[in-house]
Image (spheres, rainbow, N blue to C red):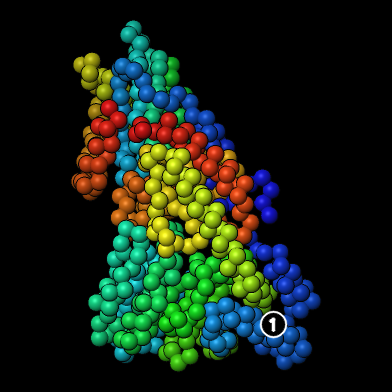
Amino acid sequence: MFKKRIYLDYAATTPVDPRVIKAMLPYLKDKPGNTMSLHSFGQAAKQALEKSRNKVADLMKAQPEEIIFTSSATESNNLALKGIAFANQNRGRHIIISPIEHACILQSSKWLEQRGFKITRLKVDKYGLVDPKQVERAIQKDTILVSVMQANNEIGTIEPIAEIGKICQERGVYFHSDASQSFGKIPIDVNKLKVDLLTVSSHKMYGPKGAACLFVRKGTKIEPILHGGEHEFGLRSSTVNVPDIVGFGEACRICKQEMKEESKRTMKLRDKLIKGVLENIENSHLNGHPKNRLPNNANFWFSFVEGESLVIQLDMSGIAASTGSACSSEKLEPSHVLLAIGLKPQEAQGSLRLTLGRWTTEKEIDRVLIILPQVVKKLRRISPFK
Amino acid sequence: MDKFYTKKVLEHFQNPHNYGKMKNPDGIGKVGNIVCGDVMWLYIKVSKDKKEVIKDIKFETFGCVAALATSSVITDLAKGKSLEQALKIDNKKIVKALKGLPPVKIHCSVLASDALSEAIYDYLSKNKKKIPDVLEEKHQRIKKEKEIIEEKYKDWIEIEEKMHKEQK
């Protein structure tokens, strides 16, 4: 897939699988219909939409009518938080979130907070795990929603979602989980997880950008945030993005077939990478949980070097990676996830995330294990700290 | 600007000029803070004649691409200059020499100019020479900024100090 360059940023976005592109092409060329049209073009589009809905539902063991297509995980998360907040504010105005959520959850919560909602931000342990007991203690009479991501996008830690789901169900509180990073990588069953809402995104699982969905369990009281032509069961008005949704559906079908084998394969490569880095680079540390982590995620911090320099130097050596350092962010603040797991700012500065995927090979991992120690060494030579 | 960093910045980052520790420097400028992400140490050697020329200059920097590139380029700009000329190297000249910096990284060029000023200040005060008013003002500003940051990040800075000591 990638000639000469090594792509290890699959958590940022994935390339589109060629099989997905093939499935999408007809809907970009000779099947241009609007799903709301009565003529045969429209009906073909409508059919493709419903077929895709089935495929997405199938991968999470949901009912097709519980799948609301959106344009992005950000939109799904906004819909989940604001939609539940607005629809249930007569019952209560208290929402609980984890501190390591994606910015779209954090910012939506903040926005709701400014409008009179009460937000409780939980704590996580040094691996990034949320303690379900803490969730139980945080639930109050007026709590309407708990939102905890299934797996963290930076450090890959997988949260005890089923346990939290059970607590929420017992207490009659809606439970949302952002599964953008985990869907298609680990098995997900919305009934076993006991979630009422689940966010999933196409471009993290070899589908195109521009398609995502929110699972909304039947009977959930939720308000739309986009009003108009009543698409998606009235929960998300907008002309349906058929080509991308078809791609999304096809991506789900492929994941269903290949997930088990692929996760095993990437996990093996990931473990080789983690072991190699910790053994070959002095003062290197693993971020996130050693076991409960996504099969494709490795995240480290290296003492005495800064993450943005690492990423750019790696890029010059043909390796694409990412960092949570302050210098790499617009706000010039280190990653909130790394700070939440107890890293000091200077430690978070030296963080590096490597995420593997469908086209990562063992040869590439071997090459990274040669280049990365050299890059760290070079930057340490320039650093006053050694 | 199409890309985040100019070619010039990346050149300096990839092959930094004059980096490393200097033995027995005449002046050292230490600026920045690891908590904020950039630490720059600049060493100078000054000729003993009346001209007071910076005959050698070296740096050690922990930081992002821009911090490394500004450190590297300021050593080029200052080398061979008299102290008086060197003090005129402000952050605008650094940005110009790098053919631009992203707005969010301009502070790195200020840091480099501060490091040089501090090294010269250190040399002048060690040798009990007269310190120009502008330099004294700049030194006071840097000192004040440092105090504010240290107050803000008290606990974390202790760890930084420990790191300094460990390497000695």
Q: Position of residue A76 (x, y in %)?
A: 49, 76
- Residue A274 shown left or right of residue A238 in the figure: left
Q: Which residue appears at 33% of the width and 81% of the height?
A: A167
Q: Quadrant of the C terminus of chain A?
A: top left
Q: Position of residue A150 (x, y in %)?
A: 43, 70
Amino acid residing under circle 1: Ala
Q: Quadrant of residue A132?
A: bottom left
Above or below, comparing residue A124 to residue A65 in the picture = above
Q: Residue furthest top?
A: B49
Q: Position of residue A139 (x, y in %)?
A: 27, 80
B147 and A294: which one is in front? A294
Residue for badge 1: A48
Q: Which residue appears at 43% of the width and 30% of the height?
A: A381
Quick one: SS at disc 1? Answer: helix
Q: Which residue appears at 47% of the width and 50% of the height?
A: A274
Residue A4 seen in this snapshot: yes
Above or below, comparing residue B47 to residue A225 in the picture = above
A300 and A117: which one is in front? A300
Residue B109 seen in this snapshot: no
Q: Which residue appears at 35% of the width and 59% of the height?
A: A127
Above or below, comparing residue A21 to residue A216 in the picture = above
- Residue A108 shown left or right of residue A252 in the figure: left
